Amino acid sequence: MDVDIWQNVDQVVTWLDGESKQATDIELLLRILKVSEEAGEVAEAVVGAFGQNPRKGFTHTWEDVDAELCDVILTAMVALRSRNPDAAKVFSAHLAGVTSRSLSTRS
């Protein structure tokens, strides 16, 4: 991928910081809570893709689910970067650890 994802995340964080009307600690808390809100939207989209709500029927597509999952990922990245300026390093190290643990269990 040609685009550095973390540079884009930094730009979003800078923009959000500039627009924020909250104290820094409250803003961070709200960004972390936003991950849960976005996860709820994934659940809503999955229910809609299955047409599980008889009153509403089929309200979403699997492409909607994909888009909502992307929102969760981006929102989590923004929250992590808002909390830690070394977010890219922290995430890379975490991913390496998870990958190592996961792949070491394979026979």
Image: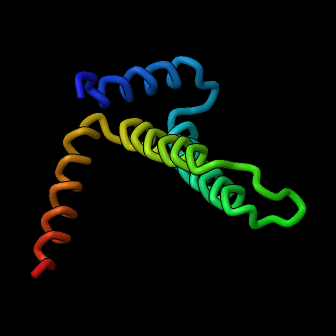
**Residue shown at 58% from the left, 50% from the top:** 62
For the rendered model, the colour scheme is: rainbow
Q: Give the residue displayed 14% in from the left and 78% down from the top.
A: 106
Locate residue 72 relative to residue 87 in the image: left or right: right
Image point 22% across, 55% down: which residue? 95
Image quadrant assignment for residue 30: top right
Residue at x-position 56% and y-position 44%:
63
The image shows residue 35 at horizontal and vertical percentages of 54, 49
58 in relation to 77, above or below: below
Circle count: 0
Residue nearer the viewer, 30 or 58 = 58
Left or right of residue 9, residue 51 in this image: right
Residue 88 is situated, as x and y percent measured from the top left of the image, at 24, 38
Percent x, y of residue 83: 39, 41
Please identify the quadrant where the C terminus is shown.
bottom left
Q: Nearer the viewer, residue 84 or 37?
A: 37
Residue 58 in which image quadrant = bottom right
Q: Position of residue 41 (x, y in %)?
A: 64, 51
Q: Quadrant of the N terminus?
A: top left
Residue furthest out toward the right: 55
